[in-house]
Amino acid sequence: MNKMPPKRRNCGYTMLELVMVISIVAILATIAMPGFKYVTTSNRIAGEVNGLLGDMQFARSEAVKEGQTVTVCISADLASCAGAAAGGNWALGWIVFLDTNGDQQVQAATEAIIRKQPAFSGTDTFVAGSATFNSVTFNRLGYAPTGVTTNIKLHDSTSNANWTRCLAVNPIGSTVTEKAGVGTPACN
């Protein structure tokens, strides 16, 4: 019989191995961070512009379905339209309501608010190409008789064109989102 004690095996990592792994992770994180910022900012901007796009499309379909005028307007208090005081700043929030008399103002007793979007909490700006573009009204046929195609531009605090998106509303009631430099009028 062999009376030699069994060999002890050392478990674990050496200091050199730990330093190498930490160095590799640090290099990979440094490379990935700019791409991650692009992804998060791009997703936030897309979510915000798609919120208004969805509410515009909802308003248009409700106008056709109900056979009456439906308005989407800027609203800081989520109960009434802000009107000219909003200056085309859609980041204040907006409401969608059944506008039975077509005056683009909510009559609390007779006109129901069917959707509300509170103000943006971040530093993104969401401003119409015209300071007077504070509401969109869809008639019972789904048209938005604005006269011309209007852009509502959304961008982050850096105004980086890579993240800028526009929501275009044309006179026939069609609403689309576009990247910077695309569309008529161009999203700038």
Image (cartoon, grey):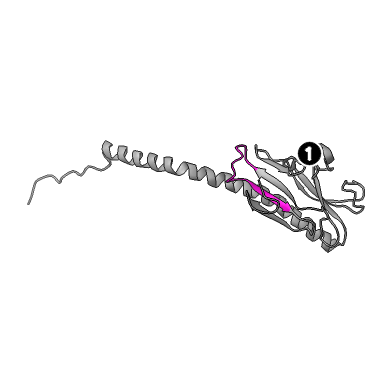
Crowdedness near tag 1: few (<14), some (14–19) or many (≥20) residues, C-alpha within 10 Å = some
Residue 156 highlighted magenta (yes or no) = yes
Q: Is residue 167 visible?
A: yes
Quarter-wise, where is residue 57 in the image? Answer: bottom right
| Towards the viewer: 178 or 182 | 182
**At 54% from the left edge and 47% from the top edge, which residue is drawn?**
39
Residue 136, position as x, y percentages in the image: 81, 50
- Residue wearing tag 1: 87
Would residue 135 be found to the left or right of residue 127 on screen? right
Quarter-wise, where is residue 173 in the image? Answer: bottom right
Q: Residue furthest left?
A: 1
- Quadrant containing the C terminus is top right
Image label count: 1
Question: Bounds of the magenta span?
Answer: 155-168
Would residue 144 be found to the left or right of residue 102 on screen? left
Residue 33, position as x, y percentages in the image: 47, 41
Quarter-wise, where is residue 164 in the image? Answer: top right
**At 72% from the left edge and 50% from the top edge, which residue is drawn?**
52
Against 135, residue 23 (above or below) is above
Residue 120 highlighted magenta (yes or no) = no
Would residue 128 be found to the left or right of residue 42 on screen? right
| Towards the viewer: 8 or 186 | 186
Q: Amino acid at mark 1?
A: Gly
> Principal SS element in the magenta part?
loop
Q: Is residue 72 visible?
A: no
| Towards the viewer: 5 or 90 | 90
Residue 171, position as x, y percentages in the image: 79, 56
- SS category of the residue bearing label 1: loop
**At 69% from the left edge and 45% from the top edge, which residue is drawn?**
153
